[in-house]
Amino acid sequence: MNANLVTTAELAAHLADPDWIVFDTRHELSDVGKGRRAYAAGHVPGAYFLHVDEDLSGPKSGTNGRHPLPDPAVFAAKMNERGLAPGKQVVVYDDLGGNFAVRLWWMLKWLGHDRVAILDGEWPQWEKEGRPVSTEVPPPRAGSFVARPMLGATVDAPFLERFREDPSIKLVDARAPERYAGLKEPIDPVAGHIPGAVSRFWQKNLNPDGRFKSREQLRKEYDEMLAGMPGESVVHMCGSGVTACHNMIAMAIAGLPVGRLYPGSWSEWVADRSRPVATK
């Protein structure tokens, strides 16, 4: 098993394993209730549902982005209601290529739980293969997870105001190319990107069937993007610090250091209209 990916066959073989915990993070930005409805209609047996806005994000202030990080202690309490403990294998899925599931993958890594993987192919692959589906909500389980935030795993807006075009930093934007270029902005009030950022659309990490590209292919693509810079130099961003984590797991699969996350991302950056914006 790849440390960051689990196949549908591997998960199916562990559905009754008490040392495995499964999370469903299906979500839709334009319909925030869609994921919960999809979960109620059918999910991987034993999977707990986590809402991207309510469980994987903290309170919004109007200036801290659309999905600010939650308080680690509050998040840990929710994990402990679902049985998280050292040594447990966590598997996460959504239905959109992992673009929401990767948020939980990164958060657990950030807070000190390393055994977490994405279901490769996600819910569509599970459903396509006729794997078991349940509508039952699993009961609470007692956990013993203690959140220990990793120092230096994130950067903030003042950091980027100072270092965004520094040659020692590679700022990578995971949003769609047309949003990066300022040609289209369906979510945030300003179009464009942070000056100095390069574009790496998160969907480039996937094959046409929705599964991740091979370790070798991802390594080749990220080595080309880095152009000799170390993986530690990368700062990842997107619209709100969620899909940026997709590029981070891709780098992990490729065997590279994942770099740092800018959690506020574009939605935080443009909340202050005095900050510079680039288009191309």
Image: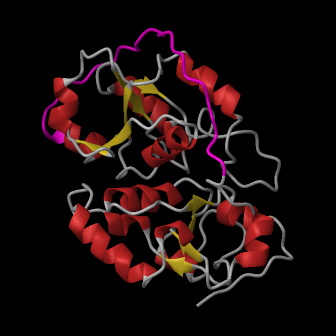
Q: Is residue 270 visible?
A: no
Horizontal placement of 204 versus 193: left or right?
A: left
Q: Position of residue 175 (x, y in %)?
A: 51, 68
Q: Position of residue 3 (x, y in %)?
A: 30, 44
Task: Work out whether residue 80 can be spotted.
Answer: yes
Q: Nearer the viewer, residue 267 or 110?
A: 110
- Residue 83 or 185: which is nearer the viewer? 83
Is 228 within the magenta?
no
Note whether 240 is above or below 191 in the view shown: above
Q: Which residues are magenta?
A: 127-151
Q: Residue at x 16, y 25 (%)?
A: 13
x and y, in percent, of residue 212 in the image:
27, 57
Picture layout, residue 3 above or below residue 221 = above
* Image position of 63 with respect to 34: above or below: below
**Left or right of 10 in this view: 87:** right
Q: Residue at x 47, y 69 (%)?
A: 231
The image quarter containing residue 262 is bottom right
Choose between 81 and 111: the one closer to the eye. 111
Asked if residue 95 is positioned above or below residue 253 in the image, the reply reads above
The residue drawn where x is 68% and y is 38% is 70
Drawn side of residue 4 relative to residue 73, left or right? left
